[in-house]
Image (cartoon, rainbow, N blue to C red):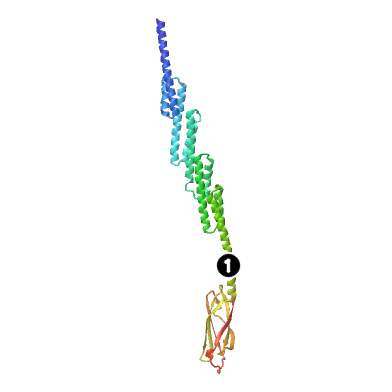
Amino acid sequence: MIFLFLGSGLTGYYLYEESVTKAAIRSFEQGEKLAIEGDLKAALQKFEEAKQKRSRFPAAETNENMVSTAMKVNDTLSKANKARRNDNFTEAMELVNNAEQSSAPYNGPLFTTIQEEIVSARTTVMVSELKFDMKGKESIDDLKPVLTRAETLQVDEAQEVAGQIRNQIVDFSINEVNNYLKDNHFSKALDSVEEGLQINKENEKLLNLKTVIEKRRTAFEEEQQKRIEHAMVAAAKEEEMNQTSAIELIDLETTVTDYNELKVTGSVKSKATVPVNSIGASYRVLDADGKQFDKGEVYINPDELYPDDTGKFDFMIYDVGKDEKNLDQFTVEVDHFTWYLN
């Protein structure tokens, strides 16, 4: 009877142990399923249940540690995302690196997903920093380092940012060119276009702008040449005038004095473009019949005239003779002027 009871007790014990083991395994399997689905908190509870039901359950303890680590990694990534949104990119990247180090010892489906999330988080931080750094830049030189960083990231988001930077560089180039063209600085304008084309080789706007600059430079140079030629012609005419027609007679008056003398007064104006001096006026005195009665030269006062200045002269004709009649019909003509250019 004793052995019978003992056998009956052992059978019950084995049945109980088998039931507990099955329940522990069931919790363990549920935990794995929840972990793969991403419900880490519920998965952690299931692994704890499995350990409670079967204290010596190494696999449940290992999975519990993995899920606990995964939850900490997710929390770290959440903090990194918050730091990124606050533009604290250095802090965000440090947190992403910490998450990567924490997950490095583990593998399997759960951590494959987590490692993908870490890669995505790192990319998001780097792209966000690129977008932040490209703001407020005022020159092509400021944008070049940001573009280089964007081009090294082989992800679609970074390449999109790189495209935006290239467009911004095109806009900068066009603005620089327009400013240079206002002052006809064609070489600098072409340099700006070439700098833009180094980054955007096939950009249609820059290629068209380069053609426009070259045409405008050619037209400007041709116009400059015409102006030079016109200036040379004008200078030659000016020189000729200064040499041959610098002095203009603007007034000449002849009067008879009470002493039967002829008084001549006159004024001149300088048409020269440079100062002239030592101006002499050669004159002829004609009688009432138009015959030359006298001739001579008189000098203008003041001695030097600047452009558009006026000067005066006067002289007397003595010894006309008491018998000379019609003296009031005598006239004076200025044949020509002489002068020196300063």
Tell me which residue sits at (41%, 15%) in the image: 16
User: Does 195 appear above or below 224?
Assistant: above
Q: Position of residue 230 (x, y in %)?
A: 58, 67
- Residue nearer the viewer, 289 or 123: 289
Give the class, few, some or many, for how many residues have Cα within 10 Å of label 1's Cα (few <14, many ≥20): few
- Position of 225 with respect to 125 (left or right) is right
List the single residue furthest toward the top: 1
To which residue does mark 1 refer? Answer: 230
Q: Which of the image's four quarters has the N terminus? A: top left
- Position of 205 with respect to 43 (left or right) is right
Q: Position of residue 241 (x, y in %)?
A: 58, 74
List the single residue furthest toward the bottom: 323
As shown in the figure, which amino acid type bears the numbered disc 1? His
State the image quarter where residue 278 is shown: bottom right
SS at circle 1: helix
Tell me which residue sits at (59%, 85%) in the image: 296
Tell me which residue sits at (47%, 39%) in the image: 125
| Residue 119 seen in the figure | yes
Q: Position of residue 79 (x, y in %)?
A: 44, 36
Q: Position of residue 144 (x, y in %)?
A: 53, 46
State the image quarter where residue 47 is shown: top left
- Position of 276 with respect to 33 (left or right) is right
Q: Which of the image's four quarters has the C terminus? A: bottom right
